[in-house]
Amino acid sequence: MKVAYASEILSLTRRDSGLHYIAQGITEDRLREFEIEDITKQMSSHAPLVWELLDELFSANPRLRYKREWGRKRAQEAAVAKRKPCKKVADFREADEQIGGVADDDDEAEYLEFLDESVPIVDADEDEPEDMSDQVEQRENALITIKKVVCVSVMLQSTNHKCNALQSIIGVFLQSCNTPETVREFLAHAGLSVSTTSINNAVNNLSKEAKAKMRELGQTFLASYAYDNLDIDLKHSVPTIEKSQDTLIHLTSGTMLPLYEVLPGDLDCSDEMWARSHLNPDIPRNVVPKVEPEDIAGLHREQEHPSGLLRDERFNAWKFLYDLLHYGPESIRKHKQNLGDPEVVDGIPLKKTSQVPNRALDVAPSTPAQNADALDALFSQGGIGDGTDNPHVQNINNSVVLVFGDLLTGERIRSLMESRSEEPTPRRRLQFVVYVMGLFHLKMACADAIWRVFIHPAQARKEDNALIKHISQIRPKETGKIESNPGFRRMHEVIQHVGIVSRLDCWSIEARKRGFETLDDFAASDPSLDELQQTANRLALEHVAGPDMSALRGGTEGSRDQQHENILLRQQYFLLYEQMSFAMNAGDIGRVETLFLPWMLIFQGCGKHKYAAELRRYLDNVHFIYPKGLSNAIRMNILCNPTGKKGAFRAIDWLVEHNNLYIKRIYGGKFSNHQKERILTESPLIEVYKNTRRQLEKFFCLDHKTTRHSPPKMKLTFARLAAYMQKHETNIHKSGRKTSYMIPDVMGKGMHVMMTPKAAAGMGAVGDEVDVEMDDEMGIEDDSGLPDEQEVEDDGSLDV
């Protein structure tokens, strides 16, 4: 029998078995094609005797095996008798105890505890499988199969070092997890992984392959580029005479994305764009189309609706109803499955977005010249450029290239193009570059604008119904941080949570008007969904500031409630933010563009002039200046969907920031191995590492692992704020109530600026310097000490 076993193992080590992996030649495709089912089938068919022997060895105690099977059968019969399905392994353990002996066995108890942790049979809210015992048995068999594959793989590698398929993929997995070198060597010596040297060789080969993928995508001229600064603090580095003592390194990270819903001819318009560009010194100024504010306001015109509400009002009503059905009384939540979503204005087709990460650049994109170096390097990685200067790249000719980035990136690219506008060739003046702003940083700017209006002024924090007082009820230890510099994630959650409780308070007020003492009593009356919808429509009109805000504030002192006016204004801005978040997640670019106008006015009124100008520039260019094919390419690709799931669209600059997080915290090494050279080498392997980790987690039945956790339980927190709002009558109009600080209607101020010819000219595509000069004339406070662009912090900001 020994000869037969050895013969079977030897047959599997032959080259034609497909189990030979050479580290220097490992590719992403080979990693992706690695499937446990294929290896299992091959091992069991080529080495049936060894496979059967391992079966017996892994179930060497027939008594325990019999008791496990008998226990599962008894548990299932008992569950059927009680009509109560078994949902946990503990149910099967209880049945084992009833037949005696098994639970007293320490080894068996440990086995059941392990199985209880590793087998998520069914969640409480999932449909119940017909036979729970089948799932337990399948998982047991899967774990035994894994052990058999591992054992055979160790034997194969020991017989032939080139027969290391499993070891190679585990080696890449260890690299992607930042596993310490001691652990890698331990696993290599145990036969479960390849050596550290082989892992490094595999990484180098994968990096070379990534370069080929970049060129393959770039030379289709149907790819967009996105990049951002990547700042990393290498705290462990030792200063020397040759090296600066500054441990902070400044790099540039980038990625390439295929363009969807685009044909090559749509981007064949570089000369046409230059012929109408304001940077072209050879054309008169009147050639550039002039866009009036009325043209902007006419985009995505409203359609008549049976409710009589406008598009924004319909969304507000939907959000009032959504909050009630998701955070209101339990008895009313039965309607949430029938709620539906707001109508789509102009949606991006649902399709999973793939990316090809670029190799990080040893360049800090902090000046126009450095951005020129970064663009040249990124285009070179994509294999495009001026073929006369570099024969290894493909000539761009008349194509344009979309480049995504944050606000500062756009400023530097425009400054660069302006300084090169008199260069003799299109390539030198970068006329083919079309900058598109990143919407994730726009969303951050929206949250920052709300902070500037409602929290930053010291006078705005004194009233009982001030936003910071409401925040103190749910975040009592964070008020100081929120007053000074809350960051995006914290401000995002404040807008969400305070907004939800405020809208639920409006529902409570409505319930009391109808004779119910509490919202729970109203829910107990079992109102229909149609009735709730009608009520939500009315709440959206009564509790949100509208176009008549200036007239409301122009009333007599005896009829006005100044505190309530502040609350109406806050509710309006909160809902504009909620609508922007929803539209971006839904991939509704039409709705996103309809929100550009109100946010442009808010930015203009609160001192964020550069964002106001950028929004105006986008609307002018995309809807009135650019050729239709290019406009469509921008609109259909300004958002991506990394998962391909509904409601999971993300901005392009979010994807770059997400890559930065992986490079900094996961794939860039740790401790003494956290070096610039490794960061540069492994930066294009983000997707390879992600896929490898998914494969190994699936292979080893680690499907209970997740990076997404259940949302926090906010019931008691919301109840505390709701009681505070009820006590101070936040959403009730009380005639004659005054305030020490009137929240400025910055949207109204922005409208005044937009309709003023001099300021409107400053908001056009030429520049935004005029905006700053107009501040004193328009009565707008200039928060010159506050940054225009918020930094993405490593605090979970990318998860919101």
Image: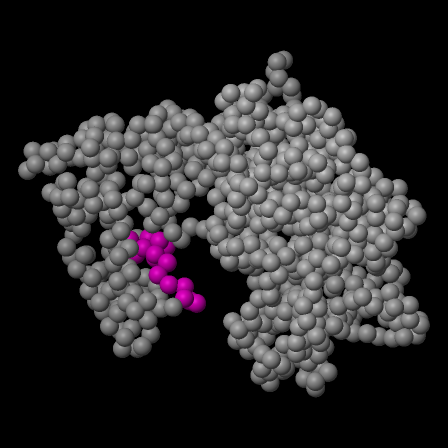
- Name the residue rendered at 42%, 33% in the picture: 175
Q: Position of residue 179 (x, y in %)?
A: 42, 34
Does residue 782 appear in this view?
Answer: yes
From this view, report whether residue 279 is shown above or below residue 362.
Answer: below
User: In this orientation, which residue lies closer to the viewer: 743 or 234?
Assistant: 743
- Name the residue rendered at 39%, 40% in the picture: 692
- For the N terminus, the quadrant is top left
**Which corner quadrant of the image does residue 551 belong to?**
bottom right
Instruction: Classify residue 101 as left or right of residue 125.
Output: left
Q: Position of residue 45 (x, y in %)?
A: 15, 44
From this view, report whether residue 434 is shown above or below residue 514.
Answer: above
Number of marks present in the image shown: 0
User: In this orientation, which residue lies closer to the viewer: 473 or 389?
Assistant: 389
* Type of colouring: one colour
User: In this orientation, which residue lies closer to the viewer: 326 or 395?
Assistant: 395
- Name the residue rendered at 79%, 63% in the picture: 569
- In magenta, the rendered stretch is 111-126
Q: Position of residue 682 (x, y in %)?
A: 48, 30
User: In this orientation, which residue lies closer to the viewer: 289 or 694?
Assistant: 289
Residue farthest to the top, as pictured: 241
Instruction: Classify residue 767 as left or right of residue 533.
Output: right
From this view, report whether residue 675 is shown above or below residue 725.
Answer: above
- Name the residue rendered at 34%, 56% in the picture: 119
Tell whether position 356 is magenta: no
Q: Position of residue 70 (x, y in %)?
A: 19, 64
Does residue 638 appear in this view?
Answer: no
Instruction: Classify residue 569 as left or right of residue 625.
Output: right
